[in-house]
Amino acid sequence: MPVDRPDLCLWHNPRCSKSRAALELLTARGIAPRVVHYLDAPPSSDDLHAAVAALGITPRDLLRTGEAEYAELGLDDPSLDDAAIIAAMHAHPRLIERPVLLRSDGRAVVGRPPERVLELLD
């Protein structure tokens, strides 16, 4: 039986094969992270800022550019600042790359490929 790991939080979309695979990898190693179905409960702007800081990337790097909302909202406009991109991800969480595994110590990875989540298990 997996052990609860409240220090790990997985932003999860159960309809995404990569997200399911990442959760399965953790579960197979006996780890039960806190799972947030981010499409149902979008991360706040503060949570998104914290995630990109933990990932060491820009908000633009966390965008899913293939989603319809990306084009509809004109997010390819290079003049958009980080705040505008964060606001778009909060309002349209399908734009957030997935899965994201966050640790309470401030480390995080995007699980692409899913095996990347294993980097946070030390």
Image (cartoon, rainbow, N blue to C red):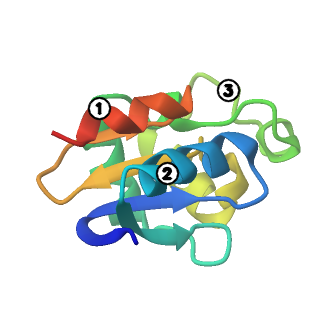
Q: Quadrant of the N terminus?
A: bottom left
Judge by depth and name the residue closer to the eye, 16 or 61.
16
Query: Please, what secondary structure does the residue beneath circle 3 have?
Result: loop
Can residue 84 be seen in the rendering of this structure? no
- In the image, taking residue 8 as reference, residue 27 lies left or right, namely right
Identify the image quadrant of the C terminus: top left
The answer to whether one can see residue 40 in this image is yes
- How many numbered marks, from 0 up? 3
Across and down, in percent, residue 11 comes to 50, 59
Along the polypeptide, which appears first: circle 3 or circle 2?
3
Q: Which residue is mark 3?
A: 77
Q: Residues within 10 Å of mark 3 (few under 14, many from 20)?
A: few
**Under tag 1, what secondary structure?**
helix
Give the labeled residue for mark 2: 86
The kind of residue tagged 2 is Ile
Q: Secondary structure at mark 2?
A: helix
